[in-house]
Amino acid sequence: MKQALVTGASHGIGRAIAMQLCKDGWEVWGIGRTFQQQTYPSSFHPIILDLLDDQNVLSCLDELDLDLSLLVNNAGCAYYGLHEFMKDSQIQQMVRLDLEEPMRLCRYYGRRLRENHGTIINVASVTALGASPHAAAYGAAKAGLLAFSRSLFEEERKHGMKVICLMPDLTETDLYRHADFQPGKENDCHLESEDIALAVHDLLAMRAEICPCEMVIRPQRNVICKKRS
């Protein structure tokens, strides 16, 4: 059974991807800060870990000693508003979790993934593709993740390793808990976490000789709603 590691796997997109991978026959280790008390498939192994705790991350990964064929860098955070009102701690958290940690995990598992002709999936955002007013730092971090994914693929493609950047639009998750808006509630105004998980399923089902390097997923309509005070 091939092994996969998914970050941010305790809820939202990460959890949906992890469960889909289990359904597809993968053995999955999922990193999250907390996990709900519920039944998981026997092939899913929750790891309670804060990715910003550098020392514990390295010791945990060393102890796991996974023979990875798939790394999904999904964990992330977002703060919204005019950039002049962003706190330094918020900027630092977004840059570290949305960009630095994926880079570090790709470096840590790079040799093993190369040996296994494995795949890296970096979950970015459509904000990586253009200007993101009211999300300047978040968009910059995701744009950095897209640029990193492109460069890493060029480094590793000759070794048979795939690097894919997945860029979803507005998704019904708690990513917007720090925002004064949320995606529209109508079915055609937002993505579901399961939509992203099915996209991962489809990407991994493609023949081994090709790499779908980038995928953008959008709801049919672009609608956001202001939260009530």
Image: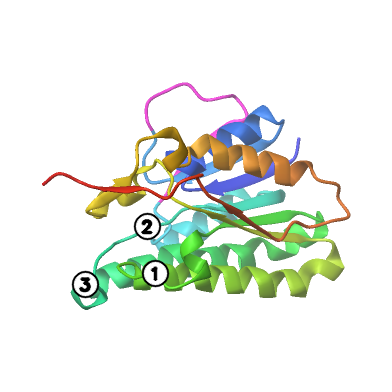
Q: What residue is drawn where x is 60% and y is 47%?
A: 5
Type of amino acid under label 1: Ser
Q: Residues within 10 Å of mark 2 (few under 14, many from 20)?
A: some
- Magenta stretch, residue numbers: 36-49
In the image, is residue 164 above or below residue 19? below
Local secondary structure at mark 3: loop
At label 3, which amino acid type do we have?
Lys
Label 2 and label 1: CA atoms lie apart by 15 Å
- What is the C-alpha distance between the residues marked 1 and 3? 18 Å
Q: Is residue 4 above or below residue 86?
A: above
Place of residue 191 in the rendered image (x, y in percent of width and height, measured from the top left): 48, 41
Q: Is residue 56 left or right of residue 19?
A: left
Side of 169 where 82 appears, left or right: left
**Label 2 sits on what residue type?**
Cys
Q: Which mark is residue 132?
A: 1
Q: Which residue is mark 2?
A: 77
Q: Is residue 25 magenta?
A: no
Nearer to the camera, 60 or 208 = 208
On the image, numbered disc 3 is attached to which residue? Answer: 87
Residue 41 image offset from top left, x and y in percent:
57, 24
Where's residue 189, x and y in %?
A: 42, 42
Cα–Cα span, label 2 and label 3: 14 Å
Q: Is residue 154 left or right of residue 28?
A: right
Q: Is residue 125 left or right of residue 108?
A: left
Measured from the top left, where is residue 202 in percent x and y?
Answer: 71, 41
Residue at screen point 57% across, 62% down: 105
**Does the CB distance between marks 2 and 3 fall below 8 Å?**
no
Task: Name, please, the residue furthest toward the bottom.
Answer: 84
Q: Are marks 1 and 3 in contact (CB under 8 Å)?
A: no
